[in-house]
Amino acid sequence: MVVPNIQDLGLIDKLKELDIYSFFDTMTKTEKSITYIVMAVEIAIEFYVFINWLPKFLSARFAAMRNKSKNDVEVWKAIQTKIDNNLELSRREQKLYKKLMKGKE
């Protein structure tokens, strides 16, 4: 049901009670076209961001997964260096050190 520009507020309330009222139905063609243009631009921007962001995110994620063993070795070397020099380990390093020590036992 398309209702053109309703001026009577009582009619709007009656339509709301019938659950068939939509603010979009009361808009002029110009207002509707502007709304469609704005929605199309917003969708285009979101699509552009999604298309550009997703491959970068996934490639970084897969690279991190491929390099996990290399990163673990580097972290282990850093932990060993800190232990040898009597330096304090960070919480993350302590957690990893405890995990590695449990695995060695």
Image: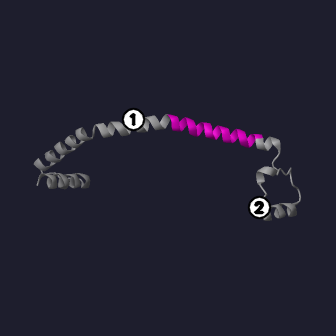
Residue at the location (72% across, 41% down)?
Answer: 36
Q: Which mark is residue 68?
A: none
Q: What percent of the width, then of the height, locates residue 72? A: 22, 43
Q: Earlier in the sequence, mark 2 or mark 1?
A: 2
Q: Crowding at label 2, few (<14), some or many (≥20) Cα neighbours within 10 Å?
A: few
Q: Is residue 88 visible?
A: no
Q: Identify the residue position indicated by label 2 in the image.
A: 19
Q: CA distance from mark 2 to mark 1?
A: 48 Å
Q: What percent of the width, then of the height, locates residue 102? A: 15, 55
Between tags 2 and 1, which lies in front?
A: 2
Classify mark 1: helix, strand or loop.
Answer: helix
In the displayed structure image, the side of residue 20 where residue 63 appears, left or right: left
Identify the image quadrant of residue 22.
bottom right
Identified by mark 2, the residue type is Asp
**Looking at the rendering, in which quadrant would you find the C terminus?**
bottom left
Residue at the location (18% across, 55% down)?
Answer: 98
Q: What percent of the width, then of the height, locates residue 54? A: 47, 38
Residue at the location (21% across, 40% down)?
Answer: 74
Q: Nearer the viewer, residue 85 or 52?
A: 52
Residue 45 in magenta stretch: yes
Residue 49 in magenta stretch: yes
Q: How is the image coloured?
A: one colour
Q: Crowding at label 1, few (<14), some or many (≥20) Cα neighbours within 10 Å?
A: few
Q: Identify the residue position indicated by label 1 in the image.
A: 59
Main SS, magenta region, reads: helix
Residue at the location (17% across, 51% down)?
Answer: 100
Q: Look at the image and give the residue range highlighted in magenta.
A: 33-51
Identified by mark 1, the residue type is Ser
Q: Is residue 36 above or below residue 96?
A: above
Q: Is residue 80 visible?
A: yes
